[in-house]
């Protein structure tokens, strides 16, 4: 046997010995784990739990009646901080990391402060397993910068998420509303009515967003999608061990189609802003309050079905400001009365004395009570006419009016004239309606304790003094004053007199739309829509249809509140009077000048000016109208209300004309999105550059 054979056997023995030791150690370890420590591992496994983590779904889109997208979703990059990863940092390390993160985000173009990051991460709205968004819509370069420095930014990452986008910018901001982080109270109320175990349930987490105003709020259940679910395994110390898969992916919310036409909406907002600017340019009248022209609204309704066509409120705001979170200072600017409260939707939340636009209500009530005609208790009205000399004195002043401030009422003097109902509306004769109030309603033979409240009864029948039913939040009801209202205000310490001190002067003032009467612009527009369609009072629709992700369509039909039994003869007389108001060439038409050149013969407008006095301020300017009246059913009813802007004929009427004329001439301009504007500007710049380049090229010399 050779030496080499002996060496080989030795090596084999050594290898076998080592293998035996290793297998022995392995079997010993298996015996130890399965025997001695099996119970310990079993206890640890039982203490690990699966936690549901919800992923917010994209909200449904909001579109106009023609399918143009008004509110969309866009995918943006968001810097998030994993709260669980911060547990290993002490206070100094955490502050240093937040400081470096704020610097990095700010340098990328999104100004961010350390305090803002700390406030978000510490907010109670985020749970211990949430990834807290600290900067939204950041530059994509941050994804690489932060990803390459995990030791410097533990738990920080850039993720994609969907946020609201507004292709038309601020257009229809008050109508659309905005979304924001859900509050604790909103969370409690919303989840209390949700069965989280039901299929398709939409429970909320504190990190979710919810509709705050406008249709975003009213149709929250429609627009909100079904959250996705993923499962995290968490040990008994609350630390995440790993992810155990996705329970279900998020499902986007339903699309909501509105009744508004974005082209008409854009026109209304543009003309409202321009009209108020013209008011502010007027020279002041010596001794009179200044025309501030600071605020106003426009509301347009389809009289045929009660659908809202446009709703503008000025000043306005940008809903995209809420996408990245709004500061306290910014929000105070939006809500400050000193800044004219841009976030206030004046169309449904502003209340104003309607002035002469209310005379149509008095007219219908007068016809119903027989105050114009052979049986009238007013002697001079028995031939259905009333004389206007420019002043009115209540005939029983000493007898019934001793506690009133005054017995005398005046109006703009147009000469000694006699009017019928149509002519009184065209000329807006205050004296005509003063006499109906004082000599008629107040002295009706069957008046009794409350018999003189026929004007109020007609106003309520026509939808005033209560909600219009519009599908928007925070609508105000306005005020139709009567004895009960005076009693309530006196009991609350607002009025110094109660219902027993409702005097003839109160009814006289009410007859021309003054006193304590208050309407919203939306109520005023719906009043004229009701007259225009012959007496059908609709609740106003904002939504037209809902379309789900799988194509299911739910339609919103007209919501008829009631059919009014309006006297057909009175309807004809009143409409004839309203048609005279904007007719150019009619010497009595109070808006004839404003409608000079309007194609009235082809597209006839029935309208009414209004000028309402406000103590210590310039008058409220109003105009309400519907049309066309010569083409079957009217297609639009509109109300324009301008604060501190003067006469309705000089401020509100021109805006109305500017909105209606494109409809009458089929020339409504198309609203453009920001992207369309950018493309048009880029195309124009390219054309200019090409033209400039052509001019710079020297012309070729002619051949010799």
Image: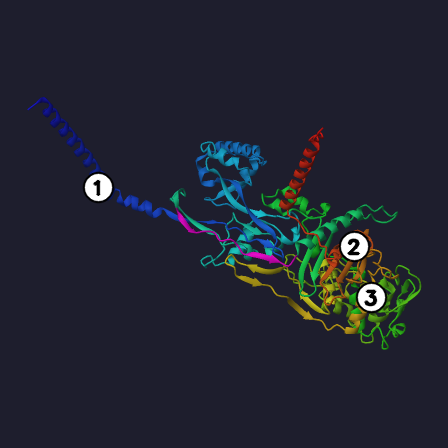
| Quadrant of the rendered image containing residue 2 | top left
Query: How far apart are labels 3 and 1 at the CA level?
Result: 104 Å
Q: Position of residue 661 (x, y in %)?
A: 76, 56
Asked if residue 363 shows in the view, the reply is yes
- Residue 577, numbered label: 3
Q: Report if residue 236 lies within the magenta region.
A: no
Q: On the rendered structure, is 258 left or right of 457? A: left
Q: Secondary structure at mark 2?
A: helix
Q: Position of residue 633 (x, y in %)?
A: 72, 67
Farthest residue to the top: give it.
Answer: 3
Characterize the local packing of mark 3: few (<14), some (14-19) or many (20 or more) Cα atoms within 10 angstroms.
Answer: many
Which residue has dot 2 on it? 652
- At a point 64% along the width and 46% down the height, the residue shown is 676
In this figure, which residue is indicated by the disc labeled 1?
A: 31
Q: Residue at x 58, y 50 (%)?
A: 72
Residue in front for this viewpoint, 433 or 74: 74
């Amino acid at each position: 046997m050779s030496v080499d054979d002996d060496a080989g056997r030795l090596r084999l023995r050594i290898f076998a010995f080592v293998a035996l030791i290793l297998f022995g150690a392995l079997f010993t370890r298996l015996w130890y784990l399965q025997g001695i420590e099996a119970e310990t591992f079993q206890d640890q496994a039982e203490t690990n739990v699966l936690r549901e983590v919800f992923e917010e779904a994209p909200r449904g889109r909001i579109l106009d009646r023609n399918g143009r997208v008004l509110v969309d979703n866009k995918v943006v990059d968001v810097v998030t901080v994993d709260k669980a990863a911060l547990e290993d940092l002490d206070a100094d390390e955490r502050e240093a990391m937040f400081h470096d993160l704020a610097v990095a985000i700010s340098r990328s173009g999104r100004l961010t402060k350390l305090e803002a990051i700390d406030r978000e991460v510490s907010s109670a709205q985020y749970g211990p397993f949430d990834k807290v968004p600290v900067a939204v819509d950041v530059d994509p370069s941050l994804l690489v910068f932060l990803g390459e420095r995990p030791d410097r930014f533990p738990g920080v990452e850039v993720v994609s998420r969907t946020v609201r986008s507004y292709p038309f910018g601020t257009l229809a901001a008050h109508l659309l509303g905005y979304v924001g982080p859900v509050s604790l109270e909103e969370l409690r109320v919303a989840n209390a009515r949700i069965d989280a175990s039901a299929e398709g349930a939409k429970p909320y987490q504190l990190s979710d967003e919810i509709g705050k105003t406008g249709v975003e709020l009213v149709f929250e259940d429609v627009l909100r999608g079904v959250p996705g679910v993923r499962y995290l395994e968490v040990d008994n110390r609350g630390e995440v061990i790993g992810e155990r898969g996705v329970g279900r992916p998020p499902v986007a919310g339903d699309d909501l189609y509105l009744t508004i036409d974005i082209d008409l909406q854009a026109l209304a907002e543009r003309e409202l802003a321009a009209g108020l600017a013209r008011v502010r340019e007027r020279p002041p009248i010596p001794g009179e309050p200044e025309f501030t022209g600071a605020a106003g609204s426009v509301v347009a309704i389809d009289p045929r079905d009660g659908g809202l066509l446009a709703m503008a409120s000025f000043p306005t705001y940008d809903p995209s400001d809420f996408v990245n979170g709004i500061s306290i200072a910014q929000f105070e600017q939006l809500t400050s009365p000193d800044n004219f409260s841009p976030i206030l939707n004046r169309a449904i939340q502003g209340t104003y004395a309607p002035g002469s636009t209310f005379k149509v209500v008095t007219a219908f009530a007068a016809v119903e009570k027989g105050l114009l005609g052979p049986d009238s208790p007013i002697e001079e009205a028995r031939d259905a006419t009333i004389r206007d000399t420019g002043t009115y004195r209540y005939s029983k002043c000493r007898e019934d009016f001793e506690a009133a401030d005054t017995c005398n009422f005046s109006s703009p003097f147009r000469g000694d004239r006699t009017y019928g109902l149509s002519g009184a509306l065209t000329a807006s004769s205050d004296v005509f309606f003063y006499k109906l109030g004082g000599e008629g309603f107040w002295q009706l033979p069957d008046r009794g304790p409350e018999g003189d409240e026929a004007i109020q009864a007609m106003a309520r029948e026509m939808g005033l003094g209560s909600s219009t039913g519009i599908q928007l939040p925070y609508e105000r009801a306005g005020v139709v004053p009567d004895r009960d209202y005076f009693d309530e205000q006196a009991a609350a310490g607002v009025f110094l007199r109660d219902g027993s001190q409702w005097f003839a002067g109160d009814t006289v003032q009410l007859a021309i739309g003054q006193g304590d009467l208050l309407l919203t612009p939306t109520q005023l527009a719906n009043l004229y829509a009701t007259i225009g369609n012959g007496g059908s009072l609709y609740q106003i629709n904002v939504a037209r249809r809902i379309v789900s992700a799988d194509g299911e369509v739910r339609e919103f039909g007209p919501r008829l509140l009631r059919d009014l039994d309006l006297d057909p003869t009175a309807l004809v007389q009143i409409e004839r009077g309203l048609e005279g108001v904007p007719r150019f060439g009619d010497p009595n038409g109070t808006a004839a000048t404003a409608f000079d050149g309007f194609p009235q013969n082809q597209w006839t407008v029935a309208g009414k000016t209004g000028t309402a006095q406000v103590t210590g301020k310039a008058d409220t300017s109003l105009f309400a109208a519907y049309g066309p009246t010569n083409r079957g059913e009217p297609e639009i009813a509109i109300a324009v209300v301008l604060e501190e802007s003067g006469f309705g004929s000089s401020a509100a009427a021109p805006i109305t004309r500017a909105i209606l004329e494109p409809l009458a001439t089929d020339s409504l301009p198309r609203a453009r999105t920001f992207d369309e504007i950018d493309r048009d500007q880029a195309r124009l710049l390219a054309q200019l550059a090409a033209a400039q380049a052509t001019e710079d090229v020297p012309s070729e010399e002619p051949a010799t």
